[in-house]
Amino acid sequence: MSFKISKNPFDFNKESDVLQAFRFIPVKTLSENNFTFPIDKHIVCLIKDTFTK
């Protein structure tokens, strides 16, 4: 299995059947504003609390 990891949002092949992209965001720049869903925003807080001490 292989997949592309990007640093840019919405960086997927628009001609593909699968419109999904994985993106790497460093913990230091990670923000709740990068996410839409409340559970994802909560997880960002947990990640930052765990890895930025």
Image: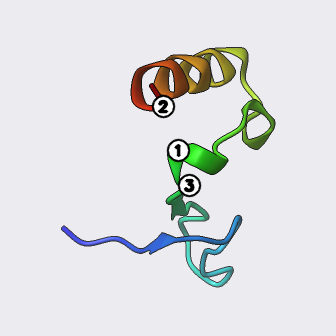
Mark 1 or mark 2, which has the lower sequence index? 1
Tag 1 secondary structure: helix
Looking at the image, residue 12 lies above or below residue 15 = above
Numbered circles on residues, count: 3
Q: Which numbered marker is on residue 52?
A: 2
Q: Residue flagged by tag 1: what amino acid is it? A: Val
Q: Residue flagged by tag 2: what amino acid is it? A: Thr
Q: Could you classify mark 3 by the number of other residues whose Cα lies within 10 Å: few (under 14), some (14-19), or many (20 or more)?
A: some
Residue identified by numbered label 3? 25
Relative to the observer, which residue lies in front, 24 or 26? 26
Mark in front: 2 vs 3? 2
Residue identified by numbered label 1? 27
In the image, taking residue 34 as reference, residue 4 lies left or right, namely left
Residue 36: % across, % down: 77, 32
Picture quarter containing residue 21? bottom right
Residue 14: % across, % down: 68, 80
Tag 3 secondary structure: loop
> Answer yes or no: do the residues labelled 1 and 2 have beta carbons within 8 Å?
yes
Tag 2 secondary structure: loop
Residue 12: % across, % down: 61, 75
